[in-house]
Image: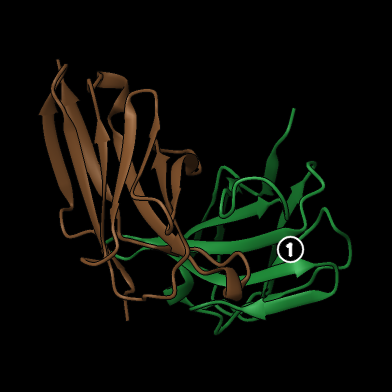
Amino acid sequence: EAQVTQNPRYLITVTGKKLTVTCSQNMNHEYMSWYRQDPGLGLRQIYYSMNVEVTDKGDVPEGYKVSRKEKRNFPLILESPSPNQTSLYFCASSPATGKFGEAFFGQGTRLTVV
Amino acid sequence: DQQVKQNSPSLSVQEGRISILNCDYTNSMFDYFLWYKKYPAEGPTFLISISSIKDKNEDGRFTVFLNKSAKHLSLHIVPSQPGDSAVYFCAASAINSGYALNFGKGTSLLVTP
């Protein structure tokens, strides 16, 4: 089954404790991205990657890191999480061909930083 | 600065009637416009898109209209069904920015029986 898988689905952590949210896709998509969804703000892009070893900042990159060492994986790293990073996070992937802009989203990771 | 705006946070429509969701944008460089649908506890799913060279695209009960001069697009759902109740996000993208999607804040649609 074609899918984007995020782990964990739910995470509660303390301020300053490094964490990684994993994202994996099995569709051989070139493009992957991370979004956060907050009440009243919709979906905002954090980072995106056009292909392996190619990453760039989105609209709200502060406090986050990413890496793209393999085509299928695009982990999101919070080196020192803070309460304002409490949010619902989505990973997405898109093919280089096909309907432009059509993205496949994971089920989301709800992160709480206390 | 929000480049894609959905000014109606919520909309309630009776089953069988038409639902019209609106979206405005400010960036004239956008080439593609998309609508995503999101149910609670799930990720958004792609619904329909339109290229900036077209003014209408239809897929079953869903039609998207684009008015470039007004920088406005709308999603029409006819007839509306209770299963259409979800949050709808409008998104826009420019080819020269890669595949970055700029999302609106979403409109929560409730279709009542």
Chain at tag 1: A
Q: Give the vertical position of A89 relative to A114 (above or below).
A: above
Residue A68: x and y in percent read 81, 68
- Residue at the (21%, 51%) spot, across then down: B22
Image height of B9 relative to B75, above or below: below
Q: Residue furthest right?
A: A70
Disc 1 marks a residue whose amino acid type is Pro
Identify by letter the chain in brown.
B
- Residue at screen point 47% across, 64% down: B31
Q: Which residue is drawn at 16% across and 16% down?
A: B16
Instruction: Answer whether residue A114 is visible to the viewer in this image.
Output: no
- Frontmost residue, B1 versus A77: B1
Left or right, residue A32 beside residue B49: right
Check the image and report above or below for B95 versus B34: below
Q: The green chain is which one?
A: A
Q: Would you name the residue on which mark 1 appears?
A: A75
Colour scheme shown: by chain
Image quadrant where one finds the C terminus of chain B: top left
Question: In the rendered view, does B103 fall on the left or right side of A102?
Answer: left
Q: Percent position (x, y) of residue B93?
A: 49, 65
Quadrant of the image occupied by residue A33? bottom right
Residue in the image at 44% along x and 75% along y: B29
In which quadrant will I find the N terminus of chain B? bottom left
| Neighbour tally class for label 1: few under 14, some 14-19, many 20 plus, Cα within 10 Å | many
Badge count: 1
Instruction: Return the residue nearer the eye: A85 or B86.
Output: B86
Residue B53 drawn at (x, y percent)? 43, 57
Looking at the image, which is closer to me, A96 or A30? A96
Query: Where residue B82 appears, x then y in whole percent?
Result: 25, 20
